Amino acid sequence: MYDTSLAERFKYLRQRFGKTVDDVHRGTGLSKSYLYQIENGEKENPTQDAIEAVAAFYSISPLFFSKKQENWVPPVPSATVQFALRTSGNLDAASQQMLEALIARTKALAAEKDK
């Protein structure tokens, strides 16, 4: 399990998906100052509505933000997964296993979103 703070997870998502705080603000309706407070660890317990808005913005499960989530796999943009699928024949066994876990997690999240 990865041990990351809520602030680190928020920042990870924003950077991984190539978004600015302004992008997240526009996509969620949350104020920029509120988002900055979360990312800088000044607001350690954002509301459930805020968590759900950010999760919906990135099309991921709100469980991503759970402190005790077992077997956490960071979400990745679908373009990254598509690239990985095209190049997976060149991977060693450990990398192939990690890729398969990412793909499984991505599919599970997509199925959950479609419910």
Image: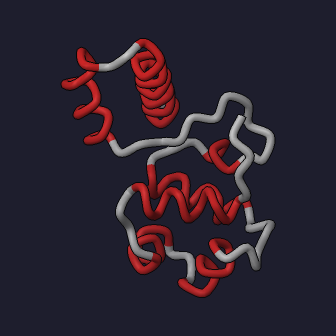
Residue at 32% across / 19% down in the picture? 91
Q: Furthest residue to the front? A: 92
Residue at 47% across / 18% down in the picture? 94
Above or below, 36 against 65 in this view is: below
Measuring from the top left, give residue 26's x and y in whole percent: 41, 76
Question: To which quarter of the image does residue 110 belong?
Answer: top left
Question: To which quarter of the image does residue 99 belong?
Answer: top left
Residue in the foreground of this view, choosing between 93 and 40: 93
Residue at 70% across / 59% down in the picture? 6
Query: Residue 45 vs residue 96: left or right?
Result: right
Above or below, 109 against 38 in this view is: above
Q: Quadrant of the N terminus?
A: top right
Colour pattern: secondary structure
Measuring from the top left, give residue 103's x and y in whole percent: 41, 24
Residue at 45% across / 70% down in the picture? 24
Residue in the foreground of this view, choosing between 40 and 31: 40
Q: Furthest residue to the left? A: 86
Measuring from the top left, give residue 70's x and y in whole percent: 73, 30
Measuring from the top left, give residue 111's x and y in whole percent: 46, 27
Above or below, 108 against 78 in this view is: above
Query: Residue 109 vs residue 62: left or right?
Result: left
